[in-house]
Image (cartoon, helix red, strand yellow):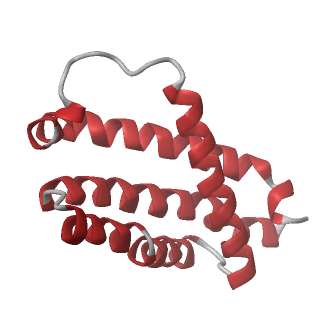
Amino acid sequence: MSTLQRSWPIGAAAGAAVAASGAWYAAFGRTLAQLDDAYAGDSAPPAWVLPVELARSTTVAAAVAVLADRTGVAGPRDAVRLGVLLWGAFPAVLLTGSVVHEKVPWQQAAIHAGDWLAKLVLVSAIVGGTRRQRARW
């Protein structure tokens, strides 16, 4: 069965990533508002934000699922390693660049980096961690 045919782990990972990200930003929202006016205000996000976030997270989960299959990830430990590696290779590098080149406060970048670390480890654990179970059946 191909990676993309196994849609339940991808969907579950996307939903978990959106929920985790919502909790993350609920916890750090005040700090972000102090660092950047774009996060100030008490208004709820527009209705279109949730479907966009689900689509973004589904894209990430599908890509991680393909990578997990292609690299032979088998089980949660390998999956978490993949998530940490992906975080270091992409969000951490991009966010460091925003601090260095765009003068984004390091605290703001650190909040976003933490969100991405949590999401990538969670997504990787869900989509990659299911491979061992499937192999046993």
Left or right side of 18 for 42: left
Depicted 131 relative to depicted 50: above or below: below
Left or right side of 49 for 28: left
Q: Position of residue 89 (x, y in %)?
A: 44, 78
Q: Position of residue 73 (x, y in %)?
A: 65, 79
The front one of 105 and 66 is 105
Question: Residue at left 74%, top 47%?
Answer: 8
Extreme residue toward the right, this view: 1
Question: Residue at left 86%, top 55%?
Answer: 5
Question: Residue at left 41%, top 43%?
Answer: 20
Q: Position of residue 11 (x, y in %)?
A: 68, 44
Q: Which corner quadrant holds the C terminus? A: bottom right
Extreme residue toward the front, this view: 101
Left or right side of 38 for 84: right
Q: Quadrant of residue 34?
A: top left
Left or right side of 95 for 58: right
Question: Residue at left 61%, top 73%?
Answer: 75
Count every numbered label the image shows and give the total.
0
Q: Position of residue 33 (x, y in %)?
A: 15, 35
Q: Which corner quadrant holds the N terminus? A: bottom right
Q: Quadrant of residue 99?
A: bottom left
Extreme residue toward the left, this view: 34
